[in-house]
Image: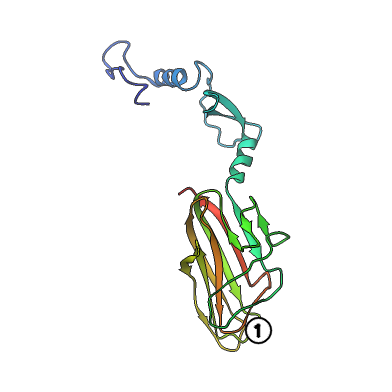
């Protein structure tokens, strides 16, 4: 806007030099869009999928229209999310030792992987899209005898955040970590757990790992 207004005198007393709303609108139309291409500047508060937006195509060096429904599809596509679990199979671990949880499933009713960003072989999430991600990790005890449980999120192979320690005797317990993690495209995160017992629950409702893109870095 500063470039558009260079050389214009803001002098309300001088004839022909008043900067009215109509004058500003014509300047914007001429420099950014096209003369007369937008005649109704009434705000549309409830856009629908059949509406069009105008964007600048850098490859074609021109303004082009985009169907709102297509833009929505694009925006969803660039916001990765996943949900993984062990599909009911318990994992054997060494008691009182931090162990990576091997999440083997990211499909079905309780799993998803929007952009093929979760590797079930390596049990890790690599976003491919930089941003802040909301991450949830839960680790459960299938024995009902654990006196200590804990969970932690590792980033690029190192501890990033440790969740709560639960110390309880004689009851099934679980540990949860819920955090916001900044990730670049090639960063990765993994879920770790610790138990006083030698088994981590495989139940989908007790042991799970998920993340969703929240905002750019």
Residue designated by label 1? 143
In depth, the one of 178 and 201 nearer the eye is 201
Q: Quadrant of residue 210?
A: bottom right
Count residues near mark 1 (Cα–Cα under 10 Å), then give few for <14, some for 14-19, many for 20+: some
37 to 147, vertically: above or below = above
In depth, the one of 124 and 166 nearer the eye is 124
162 relative to 105 in the view: left or right: left
Rendered residue at 47%/66% (across/down): 158
Q: Quadrant of residue 113?
A: bottom right
Applied colour scheme: rainbow
103 relative to 60 in the view: left or right: right
105 relative to 62 in the view: left or right: right
- In this view, which residue lies farthest toward the right? 108
73 to 162, vertically: above or below = above
Rendered residue at 55%/71% (across/down): 192
Residue 48 in view, yes or no: no
Residue 76 in view, yes or no: yes
Task: Give residue 173's position: percent from left, percent from top.
Answer: 59, 80
- In this view, which residue lies farthest toward the bottom? 170
Q: Quadrant of residue 196?
A: bottom right
In depth, the one of 198 and 21 nearer the eye is 198
Task: Give residue 144's position: percent from left, percent from top.
Answer: 64, 85
Q: Mark 1: which secondary structure?
A: loop
Rendered residue at 61%/79% (across/down): 93
Task: Give residue 94's position: percent from left, percent from top.
Answer: 58, 81
168 to 158, vertically: above or below = below
71 to 177, vertically: above or below = above
């Amino acid at each position: 806007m500063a470039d558009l207004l260079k050389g214009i005198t803001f002098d309300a007393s001088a004839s022909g030099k008043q900067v009215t709303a109509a004058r500003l609108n014509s300047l914007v139309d001429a420099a950014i869009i096209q003369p007369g291409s937008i005649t109704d500047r009434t705000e549309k508060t409830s856009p629908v999928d059949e509406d069009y937006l105008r964007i600048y195509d850098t490859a074609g060096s021109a303004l082009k229209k985009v169907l709102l429904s297509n833009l929505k599809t694009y925006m969803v596509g660039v916001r990765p999310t996943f949900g993984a679990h062990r599909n009911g199979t318990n994992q054997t671990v060494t008691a009182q030792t931090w162990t990576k949880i091997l999440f083997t499933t990211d499909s079905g009713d309780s799993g998803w992987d929007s952009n093929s960003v979760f590797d079930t072989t390596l049990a890790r999430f690599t976003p491919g899209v930089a941003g802040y991600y909301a991450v949830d990790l839960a680790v459960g005890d299938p024995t009902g005898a654990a006196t200590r449980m804990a969970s932690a999120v590792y980033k690029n192979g190192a501890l990033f955040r440790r969740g709560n320690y639960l110390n309880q005797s004689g009851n099934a317990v679980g540990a949860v970590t819920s955090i916001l993690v900044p990730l670049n495209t090639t960063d990765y995160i993994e879920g770790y757990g610790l138990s006083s017992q030698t088994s981590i629950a495989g139940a989908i409702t007790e042991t799970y790992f998920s993340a969703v893109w929240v905002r750019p870095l």
